[in-house]
Image: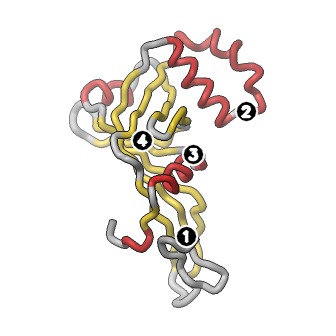
Amino acid sequence: MRKKSREMDSTWALEVMRKAPYITVSFTRPDGTAYGVPLSLACTDDNTWYFHCALEGDKLDAIQQHPEVCLSAVTKCTPTIGPKDGSFTLQYHSAIAFGKAEIVTDKTEKVLALRAICERFLPRHIHAFDDAITLSIDRTAVVRVTLVVPPTGKRKEYDKKGEELKYGRM
């Protein structure tokens, strides 16, 4: 990371990932080209993240050949005018993580993962989860991403006096 003063620890980065509405997952296709797509991920612990998708397609093809993935999340992204110099800039919280993706084949784990996703994105409708699973479990793929190293975070944010919040200054 070029600006170490903006680096945040893994606990902070995990919180960004948990709050981000989408996490971009970057894959390497079988032909070696890059493929990144924003997805709705949920975690069951700090190292285990899940997303769902169709039973076939670019994501699954990529995972079969190159299971290594990169996760990137951004929250509090706000264009702003630099308070000290009037420059155009951006305030943000971001996190990046690296992991290994695997297609989940165990039905119990698939249900657990889909429940975690539903609890994160549709908690008010969790009462309909069991019926939805009955209809969709056999036509839905679930992918587990296991982080291989703790994620890192980065922040650019100003306080009310226009001073940039550096690491350790929350």
Label 3 environment density (alpha carbons within 10 Å; few <14, some 14–19, many ≥20): some
Label 4 environment density (alpha carbons within 10 Å; few <14, some 14–19, many ≥20): many
- Separation of marks 4 and 2 at Cα, in angstroms: 23 Å
Query: Which label is found at residue 123?
Result: 2
Q: What residue is shown at x 46% (from left), y 45% (from top)? A: 24
Determine whether, in the image, residue 65 is placed left or right of residue 131.
left
Count every numbered label the image shows and give the total.
4
* Picture coordinates of residue 119, whole percent (x, y): 67, 31
Query: Which label is found at residue 18?
Result: 3
Which quadrant, please, contains the C terminus?
bottom right
Looking at the image, is 23 positioned above or below residue 160?
Answer: above
User: Which marked residue is nearer to the observer: mark 4 or mark 2?
Assistant: 2
Q: How is the image coloured?
A: secondary structure
Looking at the image, is 14 positioned above or below residue 112?
Answer: below
Determine whether, in the image, residue 140 is placed left or right of residue 60.
right
View extreme (left): residue:
31
Where disc 4 sits, the SS reads strand
Residue flagged by tag 2: what amino acid is it? Answer: Pro
Label 2 environment density (alpha carbons within 10 Å; few <14, some 14–19, many ≥20): few
Quick check: marks 4 and 2 in contact, CB under 8 Å? no
- Separation of marks 4 and 1 at Cα, in angstroms: 22 Å
Marks 2 and 1, the one that precedes in the sequence: 1
Marks 1 and 3, the one that precedes in the sequence: 3
